[in-house]
Image (cartoon, rainbow, N blue to C red):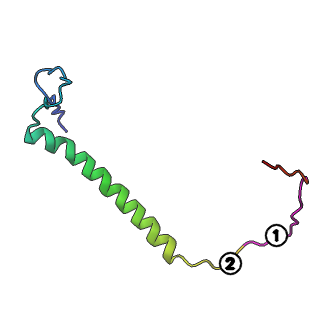
Amino acid sequence: MSNNVQPLRQAYVAPSFNDNAELPASAELTQRVRNPIRAGAKVIGVAVLGLGLWASLTPISSGVQAPGMIRVESNRKVIR
């Protein structure tokens, strides 16, 4: 496994805060940023769909029953 890590930009470009000043993004830089985002979105999508499918298809064979009693702890009423 080689460690082929290259910087995203060769030289630092100071940000400009004008309305029309945008840094041009190269195609390689755009692709290097989009690939991890797409991979993460795919992983999250598969997890959500898989859990939803599992939850909708898994049968519930029984429930747990326990004796209990509900009681009012106080008769306090707040009127505004």
> What residue is shown with label 1?
66
Residue nearest the viewer, comparing 71 with 2: 71
Residue at image position (86%, 70%) is 67
Residue 13 position by quadrant:
top left
**Residue 22 coordinates in the image, percent (x, y):** 14, 32
10 Å crowding of disc 2: few (<14), some (14-19), many (20+): few
Q: Is residue 40 above or below residue 12?
A: below
Evaluate if marks 2 and 1 touch, with contact meaning CB atoms under 8 Å apart. no
Task: Using the rendered view, name the quadrant where residue 19 is placed.
Answer: top left
Is residue 69 highlighted in magenta?
Answer: yes
Residue drawn 21% across the image and 24% down it: 17
Indicate left or right for 67 with 63 as reference: right
Q: Which quadrant of the figure contains the N terminus?
A: top left
Q: Is residue 2 highlighted in magenta?
A: no
Mark 2 to mark 1 CA distance (whole Å): 13 Å
Nearer the observer, 58 or 11: 11
Instruction: Kindly identify which numbered label has been placed on residue 6.
Output: none
Residue 42 drawn at (x, y percent):
30, 57
Q: Main secondary structure of the magenta part?
A: loop
Judging depth in this view, the residue of 73 and 60 nearest the camera is: 73
Question: What residue is rendered at 17% in x and 41% in y?
Answer: 32
Q: Is residue 35 left or right of residue 49?
A: left
Give the vertical position of 3 relative to 17 (above or below): below
Give the extent of the magenta segment. Answer: 64-74
User: Dot 1: what SS?
Assistant: loop
The percent coordinates of residue 37 (x first, y second) are 27, 47
Q: Is 4 or 37 nearer to us in this picture?
A: 37
Q: Residues within 10 Å of mark 1 (few under 14, many from 20)?
A: few
> With 41 as the anchor, is 1 left or right in this view?
left
Q: Which residue is mark 2?
A: 62
Three-letter amino acid code of the residue under disc 1: Ala
Number of numbered discs: 2
